[in-house]
Image (cartoon, rainbow, N blue to C red):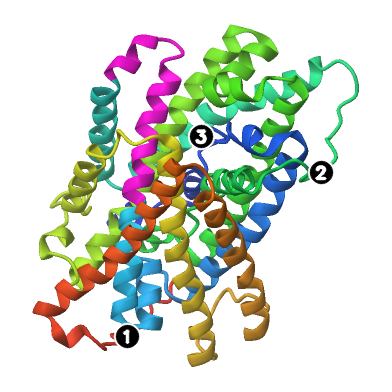
Amino acid sequence: MPSPAALRKIRPVQLVAVIFFTVSGGPYGLEPLLTYAGDHAALAILLLTPLLWDVPAIFTVLELNSMMPVTGGYYKWVKYALGTRWGFYEGWWTWLYTFVDLAIYPVLFVQYASFFYPVLLQYQVPVCLLIIWASGGLNILGIVPVGKVSLFLSAVVLAPVLILIVLAIRHHSGPLTIPAPSLKGLTFPSFGMALYTVMWNCLGWDNITTYAEEVEKPVRSYLVSMLIAFALVIVVYFFITWIAQQSGINHDTLTNNGFPALGVLIAGKWLGVAIAIGGMASTLGIYAAVLLSVSRVPQVMAEDHLLPAGLNKLHKRFKTPYVSIIICSLVVSFMILWTFADLLIIDVTVYGAGLSLEYIALVQLRIKEPDKKRPFRIPLSITGLCLVLLLPFIVYGVALGGALSSTPKALTAAGFAITALLSAEIAWRIILLSRPHLKNSFPRPHPTEKD
């Protein structure tokens, strides 16, 4: 008979679903790529960006998580490797970016639901609030209910997408071709926004480690589940973008009306309806999965006296950080009026800064603790690691540069993101007023080694 603790832990098959929704949730949100990149650059950007942006992140997460599979994940890694100040930065930036990220999904839900009831666009705010607080309640119930719901929603999301791909290939007249890759005619601002679009649709690999102590055999489970989820994401993204190209759909129509419009074009309204339902399920699953991950960060920061103590309070019955979940839901409720494009820029910019600290932590721990047990170890020397980790920095810099040279509105969003990053220093200074001993502290709890 499994122990009560074991019953509360998520299993690998459920973990694949949670990872899928944390990182992707299906191709919904990828629609603007063809508008930004055009037919000849879209697939090249779609395939190369994950290799340069995601693969280094995945392997970094796997190595650090194998050393420290603990609640708080990336926050604990950075704090352990670089000290309390940088750990606070990591947690603060992640909290901010996730508020922005979470605000996107209820809005997308309303957009897909308007395929059936256009009048919902007039009631966007109350519908969004209903989604936010219903998901908050689900997360308070615990990780296992979230995992089960994610598994169910994964089927709802992927089934119509797979049907679309099969029908499009089966009914296509003439040869199926892949446009020759070319950046000709692509402006730098458009290239930057294309990168942002793909980066946003593939980010969040580190978020899935904040609840590592709630996962069965975390080292092995994360390794298998992350590789399966990554393959699934890339295959779905490639085929849906390729099918959109083959269909001849107007790029602006795809951007404005989403993949339901592609479904209508390929097989009629019934498939558009199925894809719209999948889009609604996708946004619900992503929201629940991302809230699950971010709610654990303020919990452990509060335990370290870096945030108010009440944030680490657990529900008496479900043992979940319900105060943190409620506060996250409250903040997101005030952020649902931003536009998708602005939220995307802010989201990726702030996330990239936090991810950079995780790369630095990886290198630092390789230098300071080379012999520490790592059940998973990236097969590269420190020099090799540094060279490979330059790749996501380059992608991040190009995307940010593209946004800064884009429209004034995009420039404003990028400026807001940079201001949000700087706010971590202000918050840190406020904390030091009451806890000056934290200034140069390197608290080093013994990393938990579980498998």
**Numbered disc in front, either 1 or 2:** 2
Membership of 120 in magenta stretch: yes
Quarter of the figure with residue 171? top right
Q: Is 78 left or right of 321, judged from the image as shown?
A: right
Quarter of the figure with residue 314? bottom left
The overriding secondary structure of the stretch rendered in magenta is helix
The front one of 200 and 298 is 200
Q: Kindly identify the residue that appears in the image at 30 percent across and 15 percent down.
A: 122
Residue 247 position in % (x across, y down): 74, 20
Dot 3 or dot 1: first in sequence order is 3
The residue carrying mark 2 is: 181
Q: Which residues are drawn in magenta? A: 98-123
Q: Which mark is residue 444?
A: 1
**Numbered disc in front, either 3 or 1:** 1
The residue carrying mark 3 is: 154
Amino acid type assigned to the residue bearing label 1 in the image? Arg
Q: Kindly identify the residue that appears in the image at 16 percent across and 51 percent down.
A: 323
Q: Kindly identify the residue that appears in the image at 15 percent across and 72 percent down.
A: 430
Q: Is residue 373 visible?
A: no
Q: Which mark is residue 276?
A: none
Q: Is 367 left or right of 117, judged from the image as shown?
A: right
Residue 31 position in % (x across, y down): 58, 31
Q: Secondary structure at mark 1?
A: loop
Location of residue 212 with respect to 23 vertically, above or below: below
Q: Is 91 left or right of 268, judged from the image as shown?
A: left
Q: Secondary structure at mark 3?
A: helix
Amino acid type assigned to the residue bearing label 3 in the image? Ser
Location of residue 77 with respect to 264 vertically, above or below: below
